Structure formats: structure tokens, C-alpha cells
Image (tube, grey):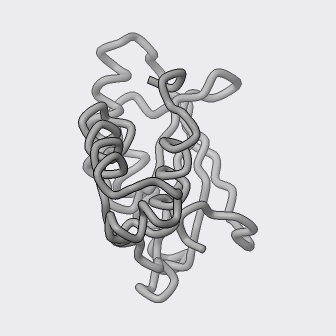
Amino acid sequence: MQNDLDGFDRAILDVLATDGRISVTELASRIHLSKSPTQARLRRLETSGVIRGYRAMLDPIKLGCAHVAFVEVKLADTREAALAAFNAGVARIGEIEQAHMIAGNFDYLLKVRTADMTAYRRVLAEDISQLPHVAATSTFVAMEAVKETGLE
């Protein structure tokens, strides 16, 4: 699909990435295209999965979740069944904001958001360390978010 996107499609995506609640009429005006073709393009981008959905972007700091830690996780077993079990466990832990399988000296990098260090220590001990096949973890606490897409 990436090669099928033209300038109008990319303009639609740029506008929606910063203003997902914009009306189709205003969107059409901003990208300099009439309403009907804009609507058709928008529908195609949604149907094809380029646009996965719309949501409210919440401010985690105002919601009391200012503490961010990145956790390197090494697994004792990296066969497909072990990875699937770990992935399923990660999906159930609400404090894990992101999880990425990594090619390197460890297997996963997790972004964990909690209220404070005490809450993080609880999540690490009671949840993350108890995930299937976890052999070791290493934590890096973020001091400041310099750039976080979607939270501007």
C-alpha cells in the first residue's frame, strides 16, 4: 500500500495525525481537494488498514502516570511457543505501554508507565518478572521525554 499513496493521501494522513476529529469538509479544504474525492480517499485508507482507527490522546502525566521506565528483558527460552506465551502475558499488563522484540543482547524492550518508583517496583516484581520464560531484566528510568509522538 505504501507505494500506492500519492501526495493527497499523504496530506490526509499528515492532517489526521495531528487532528483526528477534523470534519471531512475541513480536511478537503486543507488538502486542496473537493469533499467527495477526499471522502473516497479517506474510506480507502481506512478500509486498507493504513488508518487503523481514531482515539483520544490522553496526557499520562495529568492522569498520574509520570514515571517512565524502559526494561530490557532476556528470556530463558526463545522458541516460538515461549515467545507467544511471553507476548500474551505482556498484553495483560496495563502498565506496559509498548513492547518490542529486539535483535541484540536482550530479547525485548518494554516501555512501562506508572505513577512512581514504588508502583514501578511492584509491577516489575509482581508482573514483569513473573512473565513466562523471563531470565533477567534491566531497568532504565527516563528522566525527561524529549519527544513522544502523539503526546504533543
Against 138, residue 16 (above or below) is below
Q: Which residue lies at the image location 39% right of the left edge and 66% below the top edge?
A: 20
| Residue 49 at x, y percent in the picture | 31, 35
Q: Horizontal placement of 83 versus 112: left or right?
A: left
Q: How many marks?
A: 0
| Residue 52 at x, y percent in the picture | 32, 45
| Residue 99 at x, y percent in the picture | 47, 42
Quarter of the image with the N terminus in it:
top left
Against 64, residue 107 (above or below) is above
Q: Nearer the viewer, residue 30 or 146?
A: 30
Q: Which residue lies at the image location 40% right of the left edge and 11% below the top edge?
A: 79
Q: Nearer the viewer, residue 83 or 99?
A: 99
Against 21, residue 89 (above or below) is above
Q: Nearer the viewer, residue 104 or 122?
A: 104
Q: Which residue lies at the image location 47% right of the left edge and 88% below the top edge?
A: 62
Quarter of the image with the C terminus in it:
bottom right
| Residue 40 at x, y percent in the picture | 28, 43
Give the residue at the far front of this rendering: 34
Q: Which residue lies at the image location 35% right of the left edge and 53% below the top edge?
A: 127
Q: Nearer the viewer, residue 63 or 67?
A: 63
Q: Horizontal placement of 102 versus 98: left or right?
A: right
